[in-house]
Amino acid sequence: MTLGISLTIIANLGTMPFDSLNVGLSDAVGLTTGTWEVINGFLLVCINAFLIRKKPDLLALGTAVVTGIGIDFWLHGVFSSMEVDSNGLAYSLLIAGILLLGLGVAIYVRSKFAYNPVDGSMFVVSKLTGFSLGMSKTVVSLILLAISLLIGGPVGIGTGVAILLIGPSVTIFDKGLSRITKAQVYS
């Protein structure tokens, strides 16, 4: 999942909304994108708990820490010297990133382990509205996009593509994993 996030950032076409928020804050304040993942993850955990009137999900904060470390690993380690020098490469990285992120979300949602704070928000929206997970992910993305625009995060054509494709990507991979899981249970 963190590889997908990092690829969308590296594509430099505009990132996923939460990542745009984190990158924008990183540029403005100077902390790493992964550090902002953790800070904003904490804030989302608190907001999610308030909205559904439950205790904060501390395991979700743990996933934000792991995700933050993973993002910094890819951005400041593996891809630290990578330059995107063509539109073809940029769009390929963006699409690959969205697909990897969609697959990652579907895998860990199926695992029923702790959800990251953004996907916790997806479940909260789904619970409060009755929307599908894909539609709820899109709603959460649009809210985060508005906040990102306010702080000057990197928003571009890639952001629009990501908003449109992340929900369907999660849904498609979730359905595929559901078939695999059922096939393994009954075989």
Image (cartoon, rainbow, N blue to C red):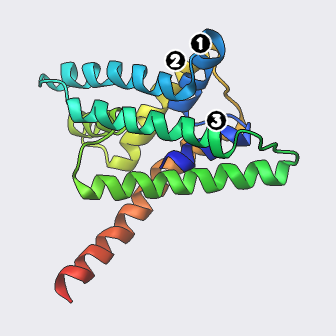
Image vertical order of residue 118 relative to residue 169, above or below: above
Image vertical order of residue 22 relative to residue 129, above or below: above
Quarter that holds the C terminus: bottom left
Q: Which mark is residue 164?
A: none
The answer to whether residue 118 of the structure is visible from this angle is: no
Residue 96: give x, y in percent of width and height. 63, 56
Mark 3 or mark 2, earlier in chain: 3
Q: Between 25 and 83, which is closer to the camera in this rendering?
A: 83
Residue 76: give x, y in percent of width and height. 64, 35
Q: Relative to residue 169, is residue 10 drawn left or right?
A: right
The answer to which quarter of the image holds residue 12 is top right
Mark 3: amino acid:
His
Residues under labels 1 and 3: Cα distance? 23 Å
Residue 169: give x, y in percent of width and height. 49, 56
Q: Nearer the viewer, mark 3 or mark 2?
A: 3
Mark 2: amino acid:
Ile
Mark 1: amino acid:
Ile
Seen at 24% across and 81% down, the residue is: 184
Number of residues whose C-alpha sits closer than 10 Å to that of mark 2, classed few (under 14), some (14–19) or many (20 or more): some
Find disc 1 in the rendering and name its residue: 151
Find disc 3 in the rendering and name its residue: 76
Which residue in the rendered view is the most extreme toward the top?
A: 29
The answer to which quarter of the image holds residue 82 is top right
Mark 1 or mark 3, earlier in chain: 3
Instruction: Report if the CB atoms under discs 1 and 2 are less than 8 Å apart.
Output: yes
Find disc 2 in the rendering and name its residue: 147
